[in-house]
Image (cartoon, grey):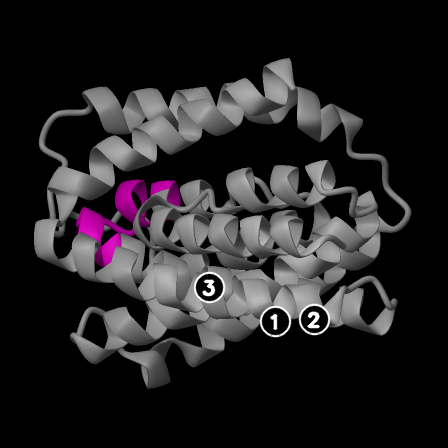
């Protein structure tokens, strides 16, 4: 790979880490960038999971350090996300995803409209609609499996679940989303690594950039809260929907 392309991919990873730490959707930047650079699709997905580990891990540490989550308490839920992602990634080897590709843009548009127009969304917690056990055992593995099977919009789905069903404020939901997304990245990464689908040198370089970008993005999110998370989440969902609809 030419050095200038390599450096452009590293720069793309930094930007993706920044955006992903706030609103998710970093893959919207890195996967197309990898494909445009000539990386084969399966290696693009595997390399993206490697570098994404650094971004989601960096954001998770930043939010945890400021007290926005209790890592020890959430480890069992994170493990369920990782387990779901393993099964999803294994299924991706045999299950066509064309139907999911067709449906996903409309789901993302619905999520964008929800966050754009629902009144009262803020960093304050609201009433929980389902029990923590149902949330952890039912929804978390399902979204984790989606991340392993397909991937785009995983952070948006976790955000929607935390805000609408767990009653979390937007900043708290963002912090918890990063942890569960980090866990699902681990699950899918394991499958791709064992199948030899990762470009390690490129993935680690992009991962270092993701780590730095995510650290900066998490700092912005914690400083500005819903004022920056809400609009960026809407824009990210719409951009991802447009990418899936129009290529």
Q: Is residue 132 visible?
A: no
The one nearer the camera, 184 or 135, is 184
Residue 243 placement (x, y as % from top left): 57, 23
The quadrant where residue 194 appears? bottom right
Residue 39 placement (x, y as % from top left): 78, 47
Q: Helix, strand or loop at disc 1?
A: helix
Outermost residue, bottom direction? Answer: 72
Q: Helix, strand or loop at disc 3?
A: helix
The one nearer the camera, 212 or 155, is 212
Mostly what secondary structure, the magenta segment? Answer: helix
Q: Which mark is residue 201?
A: 2
Up-down relation of residue 141 to residue 109 (above or below): below
Direction from residue 144 to residue 20 in the image, left or right? left
- What residue would you read off at disc 1? 204
Residue 191 placement (x, y as % from top left): 78, 67
Q: Give the quadrant of the N terminus.
A: bottom right
Residue at image coords 27%, 78%: 70
Q: Helix, strand or loop at disc 2?
A: helix
Q: Are marks 3 and 1 in contact (CB under 8 Å)?
A: no
- Give the mark, 3 or 1, whose residue is nearer the N terminus: 1
Q: Which residues are magenta?
A: 160-173
Q: Are marks 2 and 1 in contact (CB under 8 Å)?
A: yes
Outermost residue, top direction? Answer: 246
- What residue would you read off at disc 3? 209
Dot 1 surroundings within 10 Å: few (below 14), some, or many (20 or more)? some
Is-magenta flag for residue 164?
yes
Residue 209 placement (x, y as % from top left): 46, 64
């Amino acid at each position: 790979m030419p050095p200038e392309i390599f450096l452009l991919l590293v720069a793309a990873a930094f930007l993706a880490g920044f955006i992903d730490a706030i609103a998710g959707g970093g893959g919207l930047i890195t996967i197309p960038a990898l494909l445009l650079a000539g990386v084969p699709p399966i290696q693009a997905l595997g390399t993206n999971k490697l570098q994404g580990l650094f971004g989601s891990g960096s954001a998770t540490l930043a939010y945890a350090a400021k007290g926005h989550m209790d890592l020890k308490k959430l480890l069992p839920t994170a493990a369920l996300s990782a387990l779901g992602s393993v099964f999803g990634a294994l299924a991706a080897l045999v299950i066509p995803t064309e139907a999911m590709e067709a449906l996903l843009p409309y789901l993302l548009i619905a999520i964008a409209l929800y966050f754009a127009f629902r009144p009262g969304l803020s960093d304050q917690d609201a009433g929980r609609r389902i029990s923590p056990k149902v949330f952890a055992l039912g929804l978390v593995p399902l979204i984790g499996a989606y991340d392993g099977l397909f991937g785009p919009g995983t952070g948006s789905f976790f955000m929607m679940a935390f805000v609408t069903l767990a009653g979390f404020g937007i900043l708290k939901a963002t912090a918890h989303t990063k942890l569960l997304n980090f866990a699902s990245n681990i699950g899918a990464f394991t499958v791709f690594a064992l199948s030899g689908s990762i470009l390690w040198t490129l993935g680690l370089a992009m991962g270092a950039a993701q780590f730095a970008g995510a650290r900066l993005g998490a700092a912005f999110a914690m400083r500005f809260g819903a004022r920056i998370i809400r609009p960026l989440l809407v824009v990210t969902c719409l951009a991802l929907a447009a990418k899936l609809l129009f290529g």
